[in-house]
């Protein structure tokens, strides 16, 4: 079997690596072309505050949600990295306040925050008409949020570059988390089957009353006497 010279194998590996690098660079350039300006930033429990500007044209306005927008035209993205750990944010008692602002109430933007990537779950959103801002709070103490990368996705619902939005992410005081449910105390209840006893019939005996001809029935349980006839009294004194 004829083997390729070593230098040819090296050239092939170099070309393969170069091709992979170009593909990665193209993807990065494509993302940056569709991203906000700057494309991302990092904030920790002590800051700093972050600002960015939208780059979408808003032409044509999407008139719908995320699924209807075209990246770079009617929506753009900002990569927000929340540093530290949930414990760090709990110690600082802080959350991340994300807000976008614009000038005219006739413009309309919507904001969605995805965890991880643009295809990740939405952890917060804001979309109100007739305003000049949208805002959300991200609480890294909560397991549904945590820390790491987030994509702030802004949709140009009815807005253009003539009234471009400006974004900010800064620290805000955190509200107290709900108290955990108290642990159960004491002895756990036990259950038993209850079998009621059959009622005991009161047995009666006949005794002679003051008159020899009169019979009365005296109950052994109540000790009360009542007139009776011989068929009802089995034994008579």
Image (cartoon, helix red, strand yellow):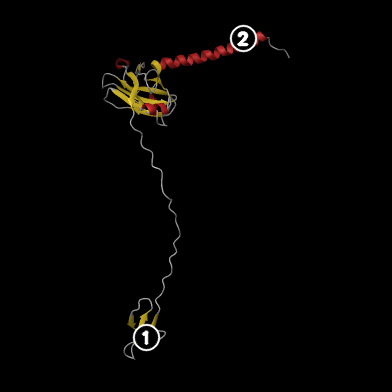
Dividing the image into 4 quarters, which one contains the C terminus? bottom left
In the rendered image of this protein, does residue 178 appear above or below residue 49?
below
In the rendered image of this protein, does residue 182 appear above or below residue 170?
below
Residue 224 is left or right of residue 195, and the answer is left
Q: Nearer the viewer, residue 96 or 24?
A: 96
In this figure, which residue is indicated by the disc labeled 1? 207
Q: Residues within 10 Å of mark 2 (few under 14, many from 20)?
A: few
Local SS, label 2: helix
Judged by depth in the image, the label closer to the viewer, 1 or 2, is: 1
Residue depicted at 42% across the width and 14% down the height? 33
Q: Is residue 215 visible?
A: yes
**Residue 225 at x, y percent in the picture:** 33, 81
Q: Residues within 10 Å of mark 1 (few under 14, many from 20)?
A: some
Q: Nearer the viewer, residue 58 or 182?
A: 182
**Residue 158 at x, y percent in the picture:** 31, 22
Dividing the image into 4 quarters, which one contains the N terminus? top right
N-terminal-most mark, 1 or 2: 2
Find residue 141 and report its image quarter. Answer: top left
Residue depicted at 45% across the width and 14% down the height? 29
> Which label sits on residue 11?
2
User: As drawn, which residue projects farthest toward the bottom?
Assistant: 212
**Residue 101 at x, y percent in the picture:** 30, 20
The answer to the question of whether label 1 and label 2 lie on touching residues, with beta carbons closer than 8 A, is: no
Q: Is residue 65 visible?
A: no
Residue depicted at 33% across the width and 82% down the height? 226
Q: Nearer the viewer, residue 206 or 147?
A: 206
In the rendered image of this protein, does residue 17 appear above or below residue 220?
above
Q: Nearer the viewer, residue 205 or 109?
A: 205
> Which label sits on residue 176?
none
């Amino acid at each position: 079997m004829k083997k390729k010279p070593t230098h040819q194998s090296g050239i092939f590996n170099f070309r393969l690596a170069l091709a992979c690098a170009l593909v990665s660079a193209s993807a990065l350039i494509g993302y940056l072309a569709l991203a906000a300006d700057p494309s991302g930033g990092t904030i920790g429990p002590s800051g700093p505050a972050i600002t960015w500007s939208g780059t979408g044209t808003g032409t044509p306005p999407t008139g719908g949600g995320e699924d209807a927008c075209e990246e770079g035209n009617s929506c753009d993205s900002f990569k927000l990295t929340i540093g530290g750990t949930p414990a760090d944010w709990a110690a600082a008692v802080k959350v991340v306040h994300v807000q976008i602002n614009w000038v005219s109430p006739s413009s309309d933007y919507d904001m969605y925050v995805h965890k991880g990537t643009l295809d990740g779950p939405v952890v917060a959103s804001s979309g109100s008409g007739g305003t000049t801002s949208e805002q959300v709070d991200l609480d890294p103490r909560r397991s549904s949020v945590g820390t790491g990368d987030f994509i702030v996705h802004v949709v140009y619902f009815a807005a253009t570059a003539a009234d471009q939005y400006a974004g900010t992410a800064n620290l805000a005081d955190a509200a107290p988390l709900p108290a955990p449910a108290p642990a159960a105390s004491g002895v756990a209840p036990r259950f038993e089957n209850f079998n009621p006893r059959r009622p005991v019939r009161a047995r009666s005996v006949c005794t002679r009353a003051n008159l020899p001809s009169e019979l009365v029935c005296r109950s052994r349980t109540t000790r009360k006497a009542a007139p009776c006839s011989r068929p009802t009294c089995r034994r008579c004194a």
